[in-house]
Amino acid sequence: MSTFPKNFLWGSATSAHQVEGGNHNDWSEWELLHAQQLAAQAEKKLQHLPSWPHIRDQATNPKNYISGIACDHYHRFREDFDIAKKLGHNAHRFSIEWSRIEPEEGKFDEKEIEHYRQVIRALRERGIEPFVTLWHWPLPVWVAQNGGWESSKIIHLFSRYCQKIASEFRNDVIYWMVFNEPQYWFWNAYVGHTFPPQRSWLHAASIYRNLSQAHREVYHAMKKINPRFQIGVVESTGVFSPRIVHTVISPLRNFLFPSLVKGYFDFFGLNYYRKVSLLGRKEGTVSAEIGWEIYPEGLYMIIHEASRRFGKPIFVTENGIADAKDEKRLAFIRDHIVWMQKAIDEGADVRGYFYWSLLDNFEWDSGFGPRFGLVEVDYKTLERTIRPSAWEYKKIIENGL
Ligand code: BGC
C-alpha cells in the first residue's frame, strides 16, 4: 500500500453557474433562447449512447437546458461543505461569479462579496483549503454586450474585477486560478458553436490576445496585493490516439494558452477526462452517459508533459466521470490516482487532486443530464445522496491506495 505526502490536497471541484442557481449572465440568457433547439437536437446527438433509452425523456425536454436554481448551492453551501468534510476532503475548488459581483458596470455588489466571504469562511471552518477560480465561463450581460472577450475593453474590466476580489480576500485565500480552460472555452464558443456567443473563429487572434494579456495583468496586479498568492493557469487536456497524432496535437490542444502566459503562473491546473481515438475505434471502457473513452494512463502522460514544459507544481484541478448509476466511478477514480502516483514516484511535483464534481450539476449545453457528482442531487427535492464511490474515495484519501 502506498500513501501520499501528508500535505497533499484532496477534494472536489464545482463552478458557480453549474451549481449555485439564480444566476443572471450571458449563459442564462442563452439557455432561454436555445433550450427548445437543444431538446430537439438531443436524439440525433445522443441516440448512439447505450444509456439513450434512460436519458431520452430528460434530454428531449427543453427544461433540462435551463440552469434555473440548479443545485441551489448558493443557499446550501454549508450543508454541501459538511458533506465534503464528511468525505475527508481537505481542499475545494469553486468559482466566483463575476455577474453577481459586478451586475452593472463599475458597481460592485457588497452583498454578493459578503456571500463569497461566507463561502470561504465555511470552507476554512471545516479545515478545507479554498481554491478560487475567477472566471469559469459566464460573463455579466453588460460585458457580453460590449463584445466579451473579442473586445480589448475586457482586459481592464476583468482585471478590475479580479483586483477587487483579491483585495477583499487578501488574507483568506492563497490559491487562485484566473481562467478555467480558456482554450477549451474558445473552441466551444467560436469553433464548435456549442457555447455562447457562437460566433466566428475569425475572432481567434483578438480573443487570444485579450485573454493572455488579461491573465498577465491580473497576475501582476494580484501579486502586488499579496505576494504570497499562488496563481494558476487551468487548461483542459486530452490524449489522442494514435500516439503520433497526440505528439503533434498536444502542444496546441493542451498547452497553447499556458505557453502564451508562461512565466505568469505559479502552478499548472490540469483538467483531464479522456482519450479521443481519431480512427473511430474506442479502445478502452466508455462512460455510458456521454460516451467519453476512459484512459487513466493519459493523466500520467499529461502530468509528465506539463512538468517538462513548465517546470511548475501541478494540481489536478478536474478529473471525473458522468455515471448516474455509480458503476464505473470508483474504478475511474482509483485508476487515475494510481497513474498520478506513478508520475509522482517518478519525480513529478503534483500537489493535489480534485474530483469533478462534488455534486451532480448543470453540464452546460448538455443540461442536467450527465451526472458527474460524488453526491447525487435530486433536482425535484434538491436532496443530496452520497454515492458509494465517494466513501471509497475517502478511504483512498485517508489510507492511500
Ligand atoms: C469544465 C466543467 C465541466 C466538465 C465536464 C470541464 O471542461 O471545466 O465545467 O462540467 O468539463 O464536462
Image (cartoon, rainbow, N blue to C red):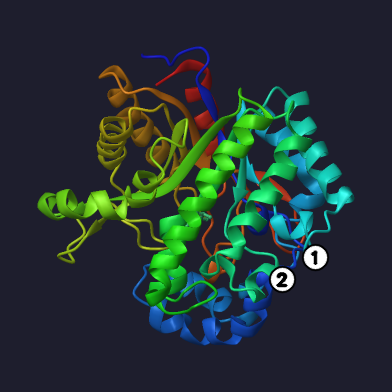
Badge 1 element: loop
What type is the residue that disc 2 sits on?
A: Trp
Looking at the image, residue 152 lies above or below residue 52: above
Look at the image and tell me whether residue 322 can be seen. no
Determine whether the beta carbon of the residue marked 2 sits less than 8 angstroms from the nearest atom of ligand 1: no
332 or 159, nearer to the observer: 159
- Which disc is residue 104 wearing? 1
Looking at this view, name the residue that lies furthest to the left: 244
Looking at the image, residue 275 lies above or below residue 140: above
Look at the image and tell me whether residue 4 can be seen. yes
Q: In the image, 336: left or right of 226?
A: left
The structure residue drawn at horizontal position 74% and vertical position 50%, both measured from the top left corner, is 73
Circles 1 and 2 in contact, beta carbons < 8 Å: yes
What type is the residue that disc 1 sits on?
A: Glu
Picture quarter containing residue 171?
Answer: top right
The CA distance from mark 1 to mark 2 is: 7 Å
Q: In the image, 31: left or right of 269?
A: right
Q: Position of residue 226 (x, y in %)?
A: 66, 27
24 or 326, nearer to the observer: 24
Looking at this view, name the residue that lies furthest to the right: 111
Q: Position of residue 76 (x, y in %)?
A: 80, 47
Picture quarter containing residue 152?
Answer: bottom right
Query: Which badge, 1 or 2, is on the more N-terminal residue?
Result: 1
Packing grade of label 2 (10 A; few <14, some 14-19, many >=20) is some
The structure residue drawn at horizontal position 67% and vertical position 57%, both measured from the top left corner, is 157
Q: Position of residue 51 (x, y in %)?
A: 42, 67
107 or 309, nearer to the observer: 107
Instruction: Check the picture and name the quadrant holding the N terminus.
Output: top left
Q: In the image, 83: left or right of 235?
A: right
Q: Which residue is mark 2?
A: 142
- Which disc is residue 208 wearing? none
